[in-house]
Amino acid sequence: MFLKIEFGTGSRFGRIPYKKASELVSYAIKKGIRKFDTGNNYGNWKSEPLLGECLKDFLINNREDYIISSKAGTYSKNNQHSKNFDPQYIENSIINSIKNLNSKYLDNFYLHGPNLSQIKTKSLIQKLKNLKKRGLIKNIGINTHEISLIEKISEGEIEEIDNLL
């Protein structure tokens, strides 16, 4: 059984002890949840590695049975937020996310909160296409709350984008 429900880790997940987090993830899997979403800076940089540790034993022999998503581009420290969509930073973030999540690839990688000019940077799109070609990410996505950006993506203006969140 594969549920459409997705287990999101947000910021609070990174604050709970491993034992409780592991119980939550195990319970979700027992109930049929196979989709997990996190972000590299969620929970003060702790949610993603915690999720990876909780999923580790499940992924060893059955990685293809799970859909794992992560995000990067928003940098948070001490409740201060900034954006960084430099192609090398994004590549490093993806590689770190893969390591943190005890995986070989991400099913979905989302740029977290970019504006249109940041997305249209050719070197960024080229970097993401290359990472996809190398098999490190399967789908390129955008996480946004900007209506104008949602419209542009849904109209196909940025054809490289597979998902919108």
Image (cartoon, rainbow, N blue to C red):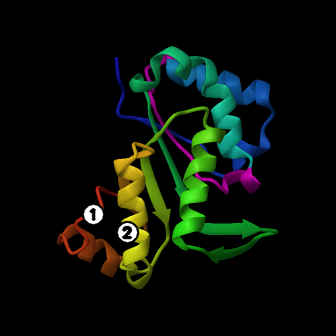
User: Do the CB atoms of the residues marked 1 and 2 lie less than 8 Å apart?
Assistant: yes
83, above or below 117, in the image: above
Is residue 30 or residue 75 the one in the foreground? 75
Residue identified by numbered label 1: 160
91 vs 127, left or right, is right
50 vs 33, left or right, is right
Picture coordinates of residue 146 (x, y %)? 40, 77
> Would residue 44 be counted in the magenta stretch?
yes
The magenta-colored residue range is 30-45
As helix, strand or loop, the secondary structure at mark 1 comes to loop
> Would residue 8 be counted in the magenta stretch?
no
151, above or below 44, in the image: below
Q: Which residue is drawn at the image coordinates 40% and 85% (left, top)?
A: 117
Which numbered disc flags the more N-terminal residue, 1 or 2? 2
Q: Is residue 111 visible?
A: yes
Is residue 63 or residue 67 the one in the foreground? 63
Number of other residues with Cα within 10 Å of mark 2, as a class: few under 14, some 14 to 19, many 20 or more: some
Picture coordinates of residue 62 (x, y %)? 46, 18
As helix, strand or loop, the secondary structure at mark 2 comes to helix
Picture coordinates of residue 33 (x, y %)? 45, 26
Q: Which residue is drawn at the image coordinates 53% and 24% (left, top)?
A: 28
Residue identified by numbered label 2: 125
Label 1 sits on what residue type?
Glu
